[in-house]
Image (cartoon, rainbow, N blue to C red):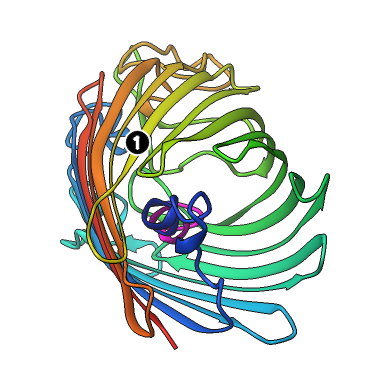
Amino acid sequence: MQLRSGLGPFIFLSLFVTGWMLPSQTLGQDKGLQVDLLSRYYTQDGDHSAVTGGEGTEELDAVGPIILVQYETSTRWIYNAELGLENVTSASLDRIDYFESAPGVNVSSASRKDNRVHINLGATKQMDRQTLGATVGFSGEYDYRSINAGLNGSWDWNAKMTTLSGKIHFYSDTLDRIDIYGFNEGEADRETLDLGLSLTQVINRNMVLDIELARSDQSGFLSAPFNEVHLQNGTILAEQLPDQRIRDAIKLQLNVALSPRVVQRSYARYYTDDWDIKSTTLELETHFKLKWKGENWIYPFIRYYDQTGSTFFGKRHSFSGDESYFSSDWDLSTFDSFKYGFGFRKDMQKKGLSRWSIRLSYYDRSDGLNSISVSGGMGWSF
């Protein structure tokens, strides 16, 4: 399975997305050491597995911990470290597993499991009006290795009511070309360059607007060599996709404090790429402060996603084989989806165990894919 960056950043954002909007919850606001232990369980099911040509079970379970460490010095340097481990059990993993008892002799494996690991390190220097930072990282799994590095910065002006932020991140990936028959045909490379630019404007004491532009430029081997395509004549081939992909997105986010105890977080995102995919995302997340000691917030959320599929996608038996590119991966198809759930976060504002959180979500896609995710964590301040 090939997920470039792992689930660490996703879990971190899911659990602490409200922190930037609520200053009393921001990690690292006090000098010293912050340690967070997070965990997530994810399960999904569906019947359009790309590994078996767009038909077949998409059953998958993933679970694993993540450790986040942040240390802020008296000279306003902030150091971050993130270590994540994940165990994945999938009905399709056995289809791409392989074992050579002798050169060129493939033996079927009963393995349905894979393990992923990722580590990211970062340093940020805070100044009066500027912030500069750098990150490096690594992730690896059974058939995939990735190293990455990035730079980011922000500049404040207008009495710190306006902030311009920029980032650049580079990924260099190596994957094993395990074909549709389970044989390893050697390694292939891909590179990804992500660029981001955002403008944050404090409109008034109760409202913050953020506009973000993003571009991602990928090149190299972008197909999944073990994804099958079943042609009209019954022949089975591996999917073929271009070796270049440019993705662009614009996101608008508006956060409004409707009252001292109610914060509305809303965003809209439009995406397009040169594989002819277009999508729109709308999300609402309402935070309610509970009348308990400390900072206690509960927040329901709902997200709607609509996608126009790629011209490279086709159902089983829809391709003749004469096409330049073809895939039966339903992630490239036309569909819409809903994701909804709720989260809870408690900040006790003290040393030692100082915060904990939990988040539950359900995802439902129009092609039949659905999933449940449960994540949670505890944090210590020293």
Position above or below: 373 against 64: above
Measured as percent of width and height from the top left, residue 363 is found at 25, 34
Highlighted magenta segment, given as a residue range: 3-11
* Residue 8 is one of the magenta-drawn residues: yes
Element at label 1: strand
Q: Which residue is mark 1?
A: 286
> Which residue occupies the foreground of this view, 21 or 101?
21
> Which residue occupies the foreground of this view, 36 or 368?
36
Q: Residue at x 38, y 29 (%)?
A: 284
Measured as percent of width and height from the top left, residue 221 is found at 60, 44
Quadrant hosting residue 375: bottom left
Left or right, residue 382 beside residue 364:
right
Q: How many marks?
A: 1
> Which residue occupies the foreground of this view, 278 or 108?
278
Measured as percent of width and height from the top left, residue 64 is found at 28, 67
**Amino acid beneath label 1:** Thr
> Which residue occupies the foreground of this view, 109 or 266?
266
Quadrant hosting residue 295: bottom left
Left or right, residue 273 beside residue 285:
right
Position above or below: 313 against 375: above
